Image (cartoon, rainbow, N blue to C red):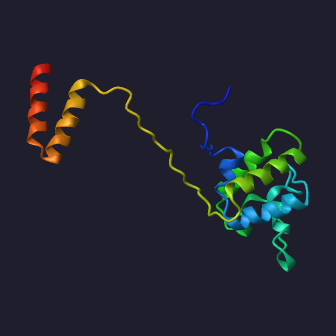
Amino acid sequence: MSKWGSEGFASGNSLEGTVRQLNPKAKQAMYGAARAQTIHKGTWNGCAFNAAGMQLGGSINETVSSVSRAAEVFGLSENVVQKFITAWDRLPGTNEESTKELIQVLEKVGLFSEASETRLARTIRVTLYKNLENQLREELEAAFESETIEGVCEMNELLFANA
């Protein structure tokens, strides 16, 4: 059974939610690393940030072995780095399965999209029931706006008849 209303919403603690918080530099480097090798969970040696640092190319290859170093290399806040690491390390499955999932999430989120660290919840309002008074008031206001006197008179008669 699926979670009602959860489609399109990514929790800040899910892998997708944390990947959305990464900037393009980090996402592109992680994507390159995940395509080239298996990314490991629960260790800095071969983890997503360490492997991504090695993907930065040439003499820029960066060894990343701490939250603060990952934040510095990729231009992220330490909070974003820690959230990603927590979500990554909690993924079920093998390192190979998790690496495939990371590739899919990166492709879904977009490698070139800017970070969306703060996402506001969407509110959808639906009127399930509107009482007669409110219905008649809205019709009356619409009649006033369209300046049809006959409509206003008919609405007044309805209001008084229902009172």
Question: Residue 116: x and y, percent?
Answer: 59, 57
The reply to whether residue 163 is visible in this rendering is: no
Instruction: Please state if 160 lies on the left or on the right of 12 as rendered.
Output: left
Along the line of sight, which residue is nearer the eye, 52 or 162? 162
Residue 2 horizontal/vertical position (percent): 66, 30
Quadrant of the image containing the C terminus: top left
Which image quadrant is residue 80 in?
bottom right
Q: Residue furthest bottom?
A: 59
Residue at image location 78% in from the left, 59% down from the top = 66
Q: Does the rendering let one see residue 56?
A: yes
Residue 155 position by quadrant? top left
Q: Tell me: residue 47, above or below residue 93.
A: below
Q: Position of residue 94 (x, y in %)?
A: 89, 42
In the image shown, does 42 or 128 lie closer to the viewer? 128
Instruction: Give whichever of 150, 145 is nearer the camera.
Output: 150
Give me the residue at 57% from left, 34% from top.
5
State the residue at coordinates (19%, 33%). Answer: 137
Quarter holding the N terminus?
A: top right
Extreme-front residue of the structure: 150
Q: Which residue is drawn at 61% across and 39% down?
A: 7
Q: Classify residue 127 as left or right of residue 150.
A: right
Instruction: Please say if 130 is above or below 101.
Output: above
* Number of numbered discs overlaid on the protein picture: 0
Residue 27 or residue 138, whichever sits in front: 138
Residue 39: x %, y % from top left: 87, 54
